[in-house]
Amino acid sequence: MKKVRVGIVGSQFAATLHAESYKRCLWAQIQAVAAIDNLDEFGDKYDIPNRYNDYRRMFEKEDLDLVSVCVPNFLHKEIVLAAVEAGLKNIVCEKPLATNVADGKEMVDRCKENKVKLMYAEDWIFAPALIRAKEIVDEGGIGQLLYIKAKESHSGTHSLYAQKKEYCGGGVMIHLGIHPIAFLPYFAQSEISEIVGMKSTGGQGNLLHKNYTGEDWAGALITLKNGVRGFVESNYITCGGMDDKIEIYGTEGNIHIDLTKGSPLTVYSRPGYGYAIEKADFTHGWTQPAVDEFMSLGYVNEINHFVDCVMNDKEPQKGVRGEDGLKALEATFALYKSSETGMLIKL
């Protein structure tokens, strides 16, 4: 069976999410990885035969069908454009698309000019619970959609790059809140028209993390073109592990989803055990360990979709195209502008 030959750029957290998901895809084979650290450990773990210290060398030497860009935000543009220049035709870029709107637009435009599929890795769209929620809404199960409230938060980033605005492009909203910002228009099937935002100001203006140069708390009220309202929040002040929650309200009902702490398992442990959920501080006492985060958070379905798009020369679905990542970036920076000016921003 012919498989899609994959190259991964990066070897840390995001690269692990992609590698674990490619392993579960029958039609994918990780052929090469490029990284500046952790290279052999990562390559050994996922049985990747070809390894490079320079991604340009990998692009030059390997015959790849698909590349996953899984590096700190400020490197996304550089690597995507290098892949385009090398003649690669299918690229997956992790969130956020770039650290500013101009760079994101250049990436989207260059890919279109060169007939390259630029796919945006928004895993929420492929989370089984959110897929089922959308089916219920689409069949009229809660009547007319009125309002969506969504957040992603935890106690602080593990990445030194994400703690610095110069590398990340902002703070918690561009790093975590980009998920609900991208999910909201996809789920409501309408574009964002207006946004009003607030955030902490970074450094000494943060609620908790004074050493982060980007904000550690942010929220926004959003109006979509079809009249649906939304509220998105993201923060680095939530103890107890990753906290992703979505509430969906309609004229005839509502749906409540707990993506990260909705495990069917409940465990009591005196000594503790290895792993419960991402960012959990400890595992003793009562916990609800995740059963399969790669599946429940959407990564497995996401990668399967991207591989299918390559194998069958299909366009990625709405919500995970390069232009969708650009729109999420535009909304994020509109939130930042609103918080700085105190004004409602129209998109």
Image (cartoon, rainbow, N blue to C red):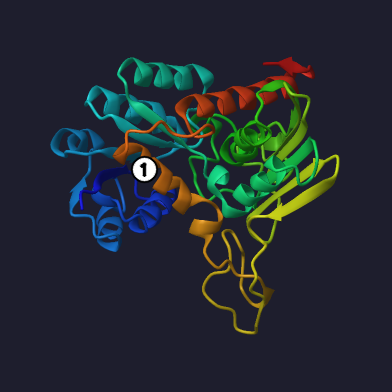
In this rendering, the answer to whether 328 lies above or below 71 is above
Residue under label 1: 308
Q: Nearer the viewer, residue 236 or 21?
A: 21
Residue at image point 60% right, 42% down: 176
Percent position (x, y) of residue 336? 67, 24
Of the 4 image quadrants, the one containing the C terminus is: top right
- Residue 147, visible in the rendered structure: yes
In this rendering, the answer to whether 9 lies above or below 100 is below
Which amino acid, by three-letter code, is at mark 1? Asp
- Residue 152, visible in the rendered structure: no
Residue at image point 35% right, 43% down: 307
In this rendering, the answer to whether 77 lies above or below 149 is above
Percent position (x, y) of residue 163? 55, 40
**Most extreme residue toward the right, as rendered?**
251
**Most extreme residue toward the bottom, as rendered?**
270
In this rendering, the answer to whether 107 lies above or below 5 is above
